[in-house]
Image (cartoon, rainbow, N blue to C red):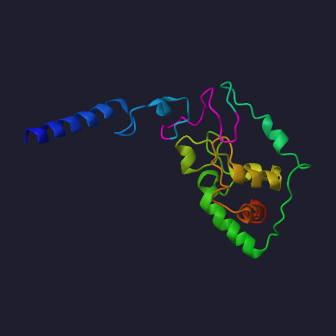
Amino acid sequence: MKHKITLLACSMLLLGGTSAFAKSSIFVLITDLYDQKSIKPQEVGSMSKFPVGTVTTDGKVFESTEQNLDWMGTQMSVDTATPNPVPATPESLVNGELKFNTYCAVCHTSSSETNEMGTAKSKVNERGMVAPAMLALTPSFPDGYIYSKAKYGGIVMPPLGYATTEKDRWDIVNYIRNKLEKQQ
């Protein structure tokens, strides 16, 4: 009986001692990964300004608090953009709509309507995300740029290359071009 009480007390001390230092789990002993410079999407407003020293999903380092978007111009050249190899057939548009509604619409919406911050009028942006309104931008983007953003992601946009096929991404481009942009 004495050994059981000692074992129980040691177990409670071990579990209680580790949770005193952790922020997210009872078994975390080292909290450096939580406390590092990073965007914390669970905190309201944390995604409106990126901490200096963080690295975006596409590999750009934020070296100052000023957001410099000059790099976008080089990625959007019509001369170097990849043309869409998938024809806009009815099947392509149906698949594109399904994939767009699954992966894109939750943040970017399917309209050009914006909120007071200038981002897409979506529930995700109400929580502090910085996703632009899809149709406010896509008319000026080449097809290859939209495809590339869907595959590799953006500053805070996750890459969808793991979740979609090459044809799915071109179908999304076809849906944006032939359905959404024509409705505006």
Q: Position of residue 36 (x, y in %)?
A: 52, 29
Q: Nearer the viewer, residue 132 or 184?
A: 132
> Which of the pair 5/82 is nearer the observer?
5
Residue located at (13% from left, 42% from top): 4
Give the answer, above or below, for where 90 lies relative to 161.
Answer: below
Q: Residue furthest bottom?
A: 90
Look at the picture and state if 69 lies above or below 166.
Answer: above
* Image quarter of residue 100: bottom right
Considering the image in quadrants, where does the C terminus appear?
Answer: bottom right
Magenta residues (range) = 42-60
Q: Residue at x 87, y 46 (%)?
A: 77
Give the answer, above or below, for where 29 lies relative to 164.
above
Answer whether residue 83 is magenta in the image. no
* Residue at (29% x, 31% y) in the render: 17
- Residue 46 magenta: yes
Return the x and y of residue 155 as percentages of the image width and height. Answer: 67, 40
Please tell me whether residue 51 is drawn above or below residue 174 in the rendered image.
above
Is 20 in front, or is 45? 20
Question: Which image quadrant for residue 26?
Answer: top left
Looking at this view, name the residue that lies furthest to the top: 64
Left or right: residue 124 versus residue 18 is right
Q: Residue furthest left?
A: 1
Query: Residue 160 location in percent, x, y?
Result: 65, 54
Image quadrant holding the N terminus, namely top left
Q: Main secondary structure of the magenta part?
A: loop
